[in-house]
Image (cartoon, rainbow, N blue to C red):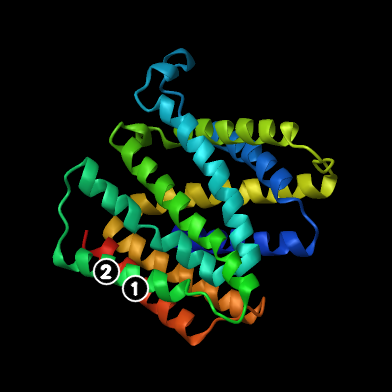
Amino acid sequence: MISFILCLIVAITILVVFRLFERFGIDNLQAIVFSYLISAFAAFLIVDWEVSIAKIPQQDWFIYTFIIGASFFIGFNIFALSTQKVGMALTSVAANISVIIPVGMALILYDEKLNIWQIGGLTLALVAIFLVFKPTNKTKVFSSALIFPLALFFINGINNSLMKHVEHLDAMSNPMLFLGLVFTVSFGIGLTFYLLKKNKKPITRKNLLAALILGLLNFISTYLFLASLTIFDSSVFFPIFNLSFIGGSAIIGVFVFKEKLRPINWLGLILAIFAIVLITYFQ
């Protein structure tokens, strides 16, 4: 239970950190790029080296470390931008309601069947997405910013689908090795992007400190997430975690960062929670 609570706190803290980046003038790209170096280093520190380094490229899941590494890097940048542009509440909904994408992929790739509860959950999720992200006619800036949570919805769904796929390739038999490689790829891609970027900002101590904090939070969140899954059944863990993550993020966003949500957004948020519970609990 302690690992679950800590995992939830750390996951929400990552959103808080992204909100604070803008306030303290932290460069998102620098912080995210070097955070993956920290996360990779932490993962490799506790890897169970049951597979020799020479045999790693021979693993069926190895090629996916490059695909997922690139997807993680893109997703984390969108995560930061979405949190800063539309707030914690809508970002948390976008990240979690994306569960419908891997469910859909499972139907196509693995011929999995849906029960009546999951069908109801998927239908409810589509309604929730419309209500949460329904643009207002009065505020063009806000509605244009919705591209970030919508992009997060798709990229997070792709990430979850890829992670579900590599589970079938036995990648999670040594999760720290797999994640360490993924984080390394994310760092490599991010560093290359930074070096090739025109008009890039110089690296500063402030940005590196932010990277250290973000990297440790990202690793700790991942570690505690995996630890919690070994304790709780997934049908219990995911509904409670997603519900708590959305609720906690919304509360902090509204009361701490003064985020504004319309009644229709609140309705969408509540429906999203119910949809996620139906999809994940009755799987």
Mark 2, residues whose alpha carbon is within 10 Å: few (<14), some, or many (≥20)?
few
User: Which residue is pictured at 65% across the width and 71% down the height?
Assistant: 141
Q: How far across and down, in percent of the image, does residue 94 sit? A: 47, 63
Q: Is residue 81 visible?
A: yes
Looking at the image, the residue that sits furthest to the bottom is 263
- Toward the viewer: 142 or 26? 142
Q: How far across and down, in percent of the image, does residue 117 sit? A: 19, 68
User: Which residue is pictured at 36% across the width and 52% down the height?
Assistant: 229
Mark 1, residues whose alpha carbon is within 10 Å: few (<14), some, or many (≥20)?
some
The residue pinned by badge 2 equals 123
Q: The N terminus is located in which quarter?
A: bottom left
Q: How far across and down, in percent of the image, does residue 126 sit? A: 33, 68
- Toward the viewer: 76 or 213? 76
The residue pinned by badge 1 equals 127
Q: The C terminus is located in which quarter?
A: bottom left
Marks 2 and 1: CB-CB under 8 Å? Answer: yes
Left or right side of 200 for 144: left
Left or right side of 160 for 77: right
User: Which residue is pictured at 16% across the width and 44% down the height?
Assistant: 111
Left or right side of 194 for 96: left
Q: Is residue 46 visible?
A: no
| Type of amino acid under label 1 | Val
| 251 up-or-down from 191: above or below | below
Q: How far across and down, in percent of the image, does residue 182 sit? A: 51, 34
| Type of amino acid under label 2 | Thr
User: Whole-Å distance between the Cαs marked 2 and 1?
Assistant: 7 Å
User: Which residue is pictured at 50% across the width and 55% down the height?
Assistant: 151
Secondary structure, mark 2, is helix
Secondary structure, mark 1, is helix
